[in-house]
Amino acid sequence: MRKFLILMGCSVGCAYALGDGFYVGIDGGVAFQNFVYNNSTLNTQISSSGLVVSGTAPGAQAGAFAGYMFGPHWGIEGGYQYMFNSSNITGAGIGNLGGSSNYNLNAQLFDLLAVGRLPIEDSNFAVFGKLGMAYASAQFGQYCTSAACATGGLPSGSGFTVAGGIGLEYMITRHWDMHVEMMNYGGIMPVNITSGGTTIGGWSDTSLTLAGAWHF
């Protein structure tokens, strides 16, 4: 009986220390995808009236990841993320025909990240940061009505970009954790988006997700 009470008390009050080992998890949340027009193609790609040079809109995001912690403070992680079609963005005409354009964005990426983790003393919480690279593929969605979509198909692009973020973790048990994190992809080195062989702008994304992970 005494052992049972100790275990029950620990389930709600003990601080769990995370050691080395593998982990896997899934996440979901919201992605704020961003498209910035390329000013070097201003005369042919964007109308001169009512100019909007960038647009950001939210959409759902889901992904999976796996990693290895070398100890309580350092690790490495790789994952896959899919950004579903964002809300429609209304901006200036991307073609030289003028007028307004509607478009949305979807993307997917693989990332490889270094993880730095700082446990908060006498608690199950820890703060962490991630930094690495991602290979992302982004495309204008099916609701694109811009002139750029009418010539050469839906604008799209892929390439390597910098990935980084911060988060807060809570160890529910010795094996389960839940964490929230904010990640940015392409804030440094945006992914080039092309239409008809011409680079018309760059893609980036800022995501806010809730994740759960199992530590072996």
Image: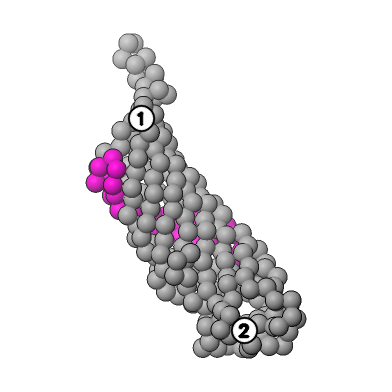
Single out the mark in the foreground, 2 or 1. Answer: 2
Q: Under tag 1, what secondary structure?
A: loop
Can residue 120 be seen here? The reply is: yes
Q: In this rendering, would 24 be left or right of 37?
A: left
- The x and y percentages for residue 179 are 45, 43
Amino acid type indicated by mark 2: Leu
Q: Are marks 2 and 1 in contact (CB under 8 Å)?
A: no
The reply to whether the magenta stretch includes residue 13 is no
Neighbours of disc 2 within 10 Å: few (<14), some (14-19), many (20+):
some
Location of the N terminus by quadrant is top left
Quadrant housing residue 8: top left
Q: Which mark is residue 16?
A: none
Foreground of the two, 41 or 149: 41
The reply to whether the magenta stretch includes residue 82 is yes
Q: Which residue is mark 1?
A: 121
Q: Which residue is mark 2?
A: 42
Q: In this rendering, would 84 be left or right of 64?
A: right
Residue at left offset 34%, top offset 16%: 6
Quadrant housing residue 149: bottom right
Q: In this rendering, would 77 be left or right of 152?
A: left
Instruction: Magenta stretch: give its range.
Output: 59-86
Above-or-below relation of 74 to 98: above
Residue at left offset 30%, top offset 37%: 18
Foreground of the two, 50 or 58: 50
**C-alpha separation, residue under disc 2 versus residue under disc 1:** 54 Å
- The x and y percentages for residue 113 are 35, 57
Amino acid type indicated by mark 1: Glu
Q: Under tag 2, what secondary structure?
A: helix
Location of the C terminus by quadrant is top left
